[in-house]
Each structure stands twice: as C-alpha cells, then as structure tokens.
C-alpha cells in the first residue's frame, strides 16, 4: 500500500505523520512521544528513533511505498530521511515543502541607540 510521510522538523521537536494517499492519518509520533524531553528532543538521534517507531507502526498497517514531504529547518531533517531509508520503505518522492515568504510583512524599524 502507498502512503505519504510528513516530517515537520522544528528547532525544538520533530513530528512524523504517516497518511494514506487520501490524507487520512494512519499513525503519527514525535521525539517527545518517543521519550525524549528538554533539549534532547531536538537532536538527530531523537528524530531517528521517532521515525523508527512510527514507521514500524505504519508497516504493520501495510504501508510499503511512501512519498516523503519534509518541512522546517530543524536538526532532525537528514536524520529522519536516513532512518526512513534504513527501515526498508520504498521512497518514490522526496519533497521539501518548507514555507518561504515571497516578501512577507514590513520589517521592524531599525534600532537606534
């Protein structure tokens, strides 16, 4: 069965969500739910363990081929991809969907001292 994996790598946490092709959530997890607290949540090792546990749950539900969507600048980005590759899921697509402003709001005034 094909599925999608959404990895949200923030500076403080890494969230992993497995969905089917329609977008219905099959299973999810994070570095915090894997047992890491505080500053250890934001490490690449925590991201690999979170991806390992969630991908095992997804494989039990029948997922064999995945499309990966990565969002965010956190330290768990590359580690999460490496963990997905080592679990044995076939990746058909890897996309970076990090939101980038195309100009954004007006910046704050310059600080004068």
Image (cartoon, rainbow, N blue to C red):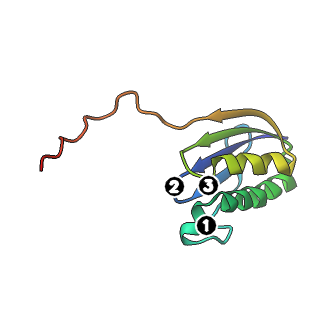
C-alpha distance separating marks 1 and 2: 13 Å
Residue 68 image position (x, y, % from top left): 70, 39
- Residue appearing at x 65%, y 45% in the figure: 6
| Among the two numbered marks 3 and 1 on one chain, the one whose residue lies closer to the N terminus | 3
Q: Nearer the viewer, mark 1 or mark 2?
A: 2
Q: Quadrant of the N terminus?
A: top right
Which picture quadrant has residue 73? Answer: top right
Res. 92 in view: yes
Residue annotated with mark 2:
11
- Residue appearing at x 13%, y 46% in the figure: 112
Q: Residues within 10 Å of mark 2 (few under 14, many from 20)?
A: some
Q: Is residue 48 above or below residue 22?
A: below
C-alpha distance separating marks 3 and 2: 11 Å
- Local secondary structure at mark 3: strand
- Local secondary structure at mark 1: loop
Q: Nearer the viewer, residue 59 or 90?
A: 90
Residue 101 image position (x, y, % from top left): 41, 32
Residue annotated with mark 1:
32
- Local secondary structure at mark 2: loop
């Amino acid at each position: 069965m094909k599925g999608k994996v959404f990895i949200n790598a923030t500076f403080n946490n890494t969230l992993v969500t497995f969905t089917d092709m329609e977008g219905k959530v099959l299973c999810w997890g994070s570095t915090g739910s894997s047992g890491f607290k505080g500053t250890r949540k934001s490490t690449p090792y925590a991201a690999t363990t979170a991806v390992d546990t969630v991908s095992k749950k997804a494989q039990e539900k029948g997922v064999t081929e995945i499309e990966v969507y990565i969002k965010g600048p956190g330290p768990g980005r590359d580690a999460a991809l490496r963990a997905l590759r080592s679990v044995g899921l076939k990746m058909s697509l890897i996309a970076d969907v990090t939101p980038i402003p195309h100009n954004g709001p007006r910046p704050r005034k310059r600080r004068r001292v």
